[in-house]
Structures are given as C-alpha cells and as structure tokens.
C-alpha cells in the first residue's frame, strides 16, 4: 500500500478554550495529517493532540492511487454561495470549498480551481479575513503552475487561518472549517473509490480515526443548539463505520482494513456522508 506522503510540512493547530470530553484519539496519528491541540485551563498535563486530515490529503491520495478525476463532485457546490449564513455554517462551507479547490488543483483543473478560489475568497471576506483572503488569492494565482510551491502554500495558509481564529478566540469557526473539509474529503473519496480498490478503501477506513477526533472536539461546543445538531449528524455518520475494523501501523504510517468493507457498508457510508454534506451546503 502506498503511504500518504505529499509534503505536509506544517501542522494545523486549533486551540480551544477547554476540553470537556473524555477519551482521545487512542488510535495513532497518520503522519501527513493536520493536528488539533486542545487545552484545559487546569494545566499542561491536560493537553491533547488530535489527528485531522490536511487539506490536500484525500485528493493527493486518490490521484496517487490512479483514481480518475470527475467533476460530478462539484455539482452541488460550484454555484453555491454562503451569503447570510451564520458563522458556523460559513466555516463549514469554507472547509468544503477549500477541499473542492484542492481536488481540482491536484488534478490540474485550473479553471475549476479558480472558480473555487473565488468562493474561498468570498467566504473569507464574510468571516472578516479580507487581508488574508487578498494575500491568499494573489499567492495562489502566482503559483498556480508550480504545484510543489502551491501545495506548501495551501498548507501554510491553512495553518495561518487556524492560528488567526485561535488568537482571536474564534476557535469554533476554525473547527468548523476543519470539519467541513473532512466531510468533503470523505464525500469525494467514498463516491470515487470502487469496491475492488483496496488502497482507496483503506483511505476511507482511515477517515474514521479523524471522525472520532472531530466528534470529541465538537462536544466542547455542543451547548450551542446548531453545533449540537451537527454533532448528532456526525454521530450518525459514525454509525456507518460499525463493523469496519482497521489497524494503524505507526512505524510505516499505513492504515489497513482488518475486515472487508462490503458494498452495503460502502453504500451506507455514501448515504450518510451525503446527508451531512447536504446539511452543510443547503
């Protein structure tokens, strides 16, 4: 199995005000994932490190596994705007747009990538990130034909955006961006990977580790009615993974499925992730 090694040079840190839930990832941390650090005010001994997918991880893996590019994944989002949405939904949609832009970027569809770049800029402006948005757009366009530089720049920008939300005590928005990106990555991979693609199925299986971490982090904010509703939807998505067992090889940074993912399980996962995605983008 190929490992996911696309030069994720920077970690993404989101600092929440507290961590009210128990547990932890407890599953190991894939080497090319982003990370979320949470703290409790009682001291450093309560700090935890969570693995979350980096913005280009799924798209880069799918291409390395020779999965064909399809514009069908854009059908519901390419003409969507986030006007007048509450900030938590703006954050979720921004995460979706970033992953769609990354998917188009990885497969060299520059026209589609630029369409999503405009959407990313718009939502960043709506979230009062006008300065960062202008710099991001310029840098992206300057590097659009230099994929290595573009990948590093996207990861750096992702890191800087999350640092901004942390420093300005808007960690919940940063977490929503990560969650939206996760959902879109799982939506893309589950709808592209075929039943006989073992590497692709392992990629899908790996994402249940990320889902566990996202659920635990979102529990920190579940006193908010909208976030509590999102949490319920994510827990329902988690139920689609029941019966899918995996091993994580921390030495070789590989995820292996211990049990075969059946066609029924894959279809259920597609159905449930599509439901969460529709909630975000509708």
Image (spheres, rainbow, N blue to C red):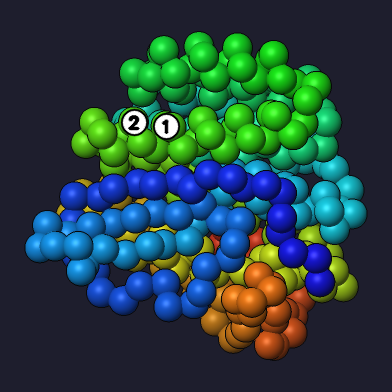
Label 2, residues with CA under 10 Å away: few <14, some 14-19, many ≥20: some
Element at badge 1? helix
Q: Position of residue 43 (x, y in %)?
A: 14, 62
| Residue occupied by mark 2 | 164
Count of marks, rendered view: 2
- 46 with respect to 143 (left or right): left
Q: Residue furthest left?
A: 42
Q: Residue at x 80, y 21 (%)?
A: 145
| Nearest to the observer: residue 41 or residue 186 | 41
- Give the vertical position of 94 relative to 59 (above or below): above
- Give the vertical position of 62 relative to 269 (above or below): above
Q: Position of residue 193 (x, y in %)?
A: 79, 61
Q: Residue at x 63, y 35 (%)?
A: 152
Label 1, residues with CA under 10 Å away: few <14, some 14-19, many ≥20: many
Name which quarter of the figure residue 262 lies in: bottom right
Q: Position of residue 148 (x, y in %)?
A: 74, 34
Q: Is residue 232 visible?
A: no
| Residue occupied by mark 1 | 161
Element at badge 2? helix
Q: Position of residue 16 (x, y in %)?
A: 25, 50
- Give the vertical position of 210 relative to 97 (above or below): below
| Nearest to the observer: residue 240 or residue 164 | 164
Q: Dots 1 and 2: beta carbons under 8 Å?
A: yes
Q: CA distance from mark 1 to mark 2?
A: 5 Å
Q: Residue at x 85, y 69 (%)?
A: 197
Quarter of the image where the N terminus is located: bottom right
Q: Is residue 8 visible?
A: yes
């Amino acid at each position: 199995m190929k490992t996911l090694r696309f030069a994720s040079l920077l970690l993404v840190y989101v600092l929440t005000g507290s961590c009210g839930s128990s547990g932890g990832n407890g599953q190991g941390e894939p080497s090319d994932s982003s990370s979320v650090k949470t703290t409790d005010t009682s001291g450093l001994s309560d700090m935890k490190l969570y693995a979350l997918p980096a913005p280009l991880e799924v798209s880069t893996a799918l291409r390395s596994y020779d999965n064909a590019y399809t514009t069908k994944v854009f059908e519901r989002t390419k003409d969507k705007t986030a006007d007048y949405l509450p900030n938590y939904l703006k954050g979720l949609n921004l995460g979706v747009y970033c992953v769609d832009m990354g998917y188009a970027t990885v497969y060299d569809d520059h026209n589609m990538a630029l369409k999503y770049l405009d959407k990313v800029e718009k939502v960043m402006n709506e979230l009062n990130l006008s300065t960062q948005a202008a710099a991001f757009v310029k840098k992206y366009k300057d590097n659009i034909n230099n994929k290595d530089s573009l990948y590093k720049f996207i990861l750096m920008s992702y890191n800087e955006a999350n640092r901004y939300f942390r420093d300005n005590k808007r960690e919940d928005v940063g977490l929503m961006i990560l969650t939206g990106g996760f959902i879109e990555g799982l939506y893309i991979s589950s709808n592209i990977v075929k039943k006989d693609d073992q590497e692709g199925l392992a990629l899908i299986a790996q994402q249940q580790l990320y889902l566990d971490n996202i659920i635990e982090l979102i529990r920190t904010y579940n006193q908010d009615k909208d976030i509590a509703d999102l949490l319920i939807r994510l827990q329902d998505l988690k139920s689609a993974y029941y019966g899918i067992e995996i091993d994580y090889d921390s030495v070789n940074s590989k995820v292996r499925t211990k049990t075969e993912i059946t066609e029924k399980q894959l279809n259920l996962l597609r159905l449930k992730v599509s439901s969460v995605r529709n909630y975000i983008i509708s």
